[in-house]
Amino acid sequence: MKAIVYKSTGSWYILKGDDNRFHQARLKGKFKIDEITSTNPIAVGDSVEFELESEEGERVIISDLHPRSNYINRISPANKRMHHIVASNIDQSVLVATIKDPKTSIGFIDRFLVTSEAFHIPAIVLFNKSDIYSEKELKIFHERKEIYERVGYKVLLVSATNGDGIEELEQTLKNKSTLFSGHSGVGKSSLINTILGDSNIRTNEVSTWSGKGMHTTTFAEMYDLPFGGSIIDTPGMREFAIADIERSELSHYFPEMRALLNECQYNNCMHINEPSCAVKNAAINGQISEERYISYCTILDSIKENNWD
Ligand SMILES: Nc1nc2c(ncn2[C@@H]2O[C@H](COP(=O)(O)OP(=O)(O)O)[C@@H](O)[C@H]2O)c(=O)[nH]1
Ligand SMILES: [Mg+2]
Ligand SMILES: [Zn+2]
């Protein structure tokens, strides 16, 4: 039978089967791992086949993995040469950011957007905690909104606390599988609670869940939405797999730069010191925002460092 992975701790999984029931699952002993650079063979969002292990059917064995339409990686905290698949089969990703308590930097937002572009996953920038923004912070929000909308990203302003903007967010999430990421403390779990309300369709209802007492927040987890679609909540992630991106391809993941690449004099232009560089000229004349160009330079530098060690 077919199922979707809703939660994974590395050794145990929670699946929702085509029978609409949740099952606690483990991997078949001889499960073939072909992604040897990944620390986890099965990730949240995966579509799998399973077999019953016990009569009641609550415990099952994952016997096969269906091909993924996409996935998001991060560098394994334990081993920098290995990757951890955060989630798969995603329609879009929402970066939950805040202007205050805590502050999300433009650099962090841009790294997230570059990663989403590299994985071909449409990205949305959401600012939460609007209820605590003063005039000053609202002004900063509008500046950011301008920067990202110009590039083509959707930008939302919401409050999990007072419900402002939640309706528009729900419209954006409807019937899609959405990855939520962002720093710890920005309100990912609060937003999900606000959206789920009393619908109570949580995966951790599985009674025999052996992960009780574990730090479940260190694992991604998927929730069904009452109006169709699903959300994947992720633990605070600092490191996306930027190191996987070649220096020469980085500008392809800035949509406003991508549009200008043919106009640079050199086709291997890095957009730093080269003569007749359309990207740098656009940054100078304001067509490309200064903040985005600085992020480009900063990320480019970090890739160089990664390749040296
Ligand atoms: N004022 C305000 N506080 C919020 C809002 N959303 C979340 N918080 C608070 O921010 C803290 C972190 O929220 P949490 O959902 O755990 O963040 P997560 O780490 O991203 O999942 C908690 O104390 C929440 O009550 C909001 O919209 N407004
Ligand atoms: Mg959380
Ligand atoms: Zn150039």
Image (cartoon, grey):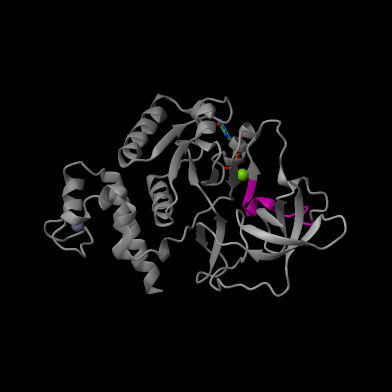
**Can you tell me which quadrant of the image ligand 3 is in?**
bottom left
Q: Residue 258 vs residue 89: left or right?
A: left
Residue 176 shown in magenta: no
Q: How many marks?
A: 0
Residue 215 shown in magenta: yes
Residue 95 placement (x, y as % from top left): 48, 44
Residue 156 placement (x, y as % from top left): 45, 33
Farthest-out residue, right: 55
**Is 132 drawn above or below residue 85 in the view shown?**
above
Residue 187 placement (x, y as % from top left): 57, 38
121 and 113: which is toward the camera: 121
**Is 40 drawn above or below residue 257 in the view shown?**
below
| Rendered-image quadrant of the C terminus | bottom left
Residue 35 placement (x, y as % from top left): 55, 71
**Which residue occupies 13% across, 60% down?**
265
User: In the picture, residue 14 is in which quadrant?
Assistant: bottom right
216 and 208: which is toward the camera: 208
The boundaries of the magenta stretch are 210-222
Q: Is the stretch drawn in magenta largely helix, strand or loop? A: loop
User: In the picture, residue 32 is in which quadrant?
Assistant: bottom right
User: In the picture, residue 137 is in which quadrant?
Assistant: top left
